[in-house]
Amino acid sequence: MQIVIIGSGNVAFHLAKAFVLNKIPLVQIFGRNEKELKKISGELNILYSTENLAKADLYIICVSDNSVEDVSKMITENNCLVAHTSGSLPKEILSGNYRKGSFYPLQTFSRSKALDYLKIPFFIEAENDDDRKILFNIASKISENVMESTPEKRKYIHLTAVFACNFVNHLFARAKEISDSQEIPFDYFLPLIDETVQKIYEIDPKSAQTGPAVRNDKRVLELHEQLLSGESLEIYKTMNHSIQKMYEL
Amino acid sequence: MQIVIIGSGNVAFHLAKAFVLNKIPLVQIFGRNEKELKKISGELNILYSTENLAKADLYIICVSDNSVEDVSKMITENNCLVAHTSGSLPKEILSGNYRKGSFYPLQTFSRSKALDYLKIPFFIEAENDDDRKILFNIASKISENVMESTPEKRKYIHLTAVFACNFVNHLFARAKEISDSQEIPFDYFLPLIDETVQKIYEIDPKSAQTGPAVRNDKRVLELHEQLLSGESLEIYKTMNHSIQKMYEL
């Protein structure tokens, strides 16, 4: 089986790395950004091109959602399987006469951060059992957590991930903005953040809620609002409102 | 030095436990809730009372912010030090002729969840150097991370903690609500959540941001809004707005 990864961003890099580490042969990594491709190619010892897409049995498209359709048109082969890694696009966005699939790794990828690929859940969709099996087998070489999915389910998986990852990270960014403004080292908060996450391994997050909103501590809520402005104030109000609604306060 | 802990909630329990584990003598745990006090007393082998507050050199008040003032009036000793554990109350809320202080552990406490007390940052305030030393020494027996604070600084520490802990947990609760609604096991998201937190040990959270908002992926943002309603929709809009403001999108 000849495989090509298309893209040069964080997902492409980590997927290519996981392939190499697990001895899944890659014939090429293809993309537009020569500088990035060169780096990936050098680090992982795989061929790259910005111009001539290699012939393959499977193409995995790891580009931003906005580019998936355009990129998919560059594949002129018919007898091949093409899958994208998007959390929210249908596989039908892929535009060509080939078989289509989805190969969605549920993880947040930063270029500079090593990952335990074994723990990454992969969600697979395909047009037929043979293709499902192909994608399933490849993902299973990387991860111990591979599942079939549906377009509808994948939308909600991605949405949940936005809350549990993207928004959580943004809260960290806003929290750090507040502590930085008072020259309080953000490191002080790391044990608290660790514990916040450790808790949900043992307790349902709804039962684990603490803080002024769930205690309906109006004095603290008002005090905090006076310390905040702009987007952080908006977040403060929205989150407290949502907490109080959840607990019917 | 005779010490009494006042309160029977999560903070009182964990502080009492940390005292016992580190052989800091407690003469009593005092509160209103006999059932809880009995449990703590039995588990930690310390005396409790709901009626007769023992004589002590140091009282640590671990009750909800709303009750600190009332509870502080029950201490009729003059030659003693009284400290509360609140993140946001000034030490002057303590109402009596004794010396006043603040003994603030920066952590989220759930009754059923064991904690590594050594990692909990403690923030200390007192009226004079001797009292500061007393509180500092006690906290240092529990934790390797004890610092002096000021009322102003403590307010911002607490506010930062609300963002980094209370709001993060609420995002987990809302995320789980979404995944539960589609019968997607929330466990799938734990590696992603772990990685989201691991990242900020290495990368500034502002640099670590991923997701549709920071990519300004309008198609996905609109799709997600259609899947949401109520408080989760409000959170979705507020967080995305804040992300896009932070990155000037």
Image (tube, coloured by chain):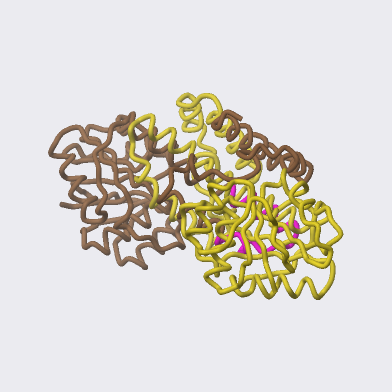
Chain colours: A brown, B yellow
Q: Position of residue B17 (x, y in %)?
A: 54, 63
Residue B61 point in image, percent of width and height: 69, 56
Dominant secondary structure, magenta: helix
Q: Residue at x 55, y 33 (%)?
A: B236
Residue at screen point 37% across, 40% down: A86
Q: Which residue lies furthest to the right in this view?
A: B97
Which of the 4 image quadrants contains residue A102?
top left
Residue placed most toward the observer, B208 or A1: B208
The single residue placed furthest to the left in the displayed view is A130
- The boundaries of the magenta stretch are A171-191
Residue B27: x and y, percent? 63, 66
Q: Toward the viewer: B26 or A183?
A: B26
Q: Does the magenta stretch include residue A177?
A: yes
Residue B146 in the magenta stretch? The answer is no
Q: Residue furthest front?
A: B52
Screen quadrant of the C terminus of chain A: top right
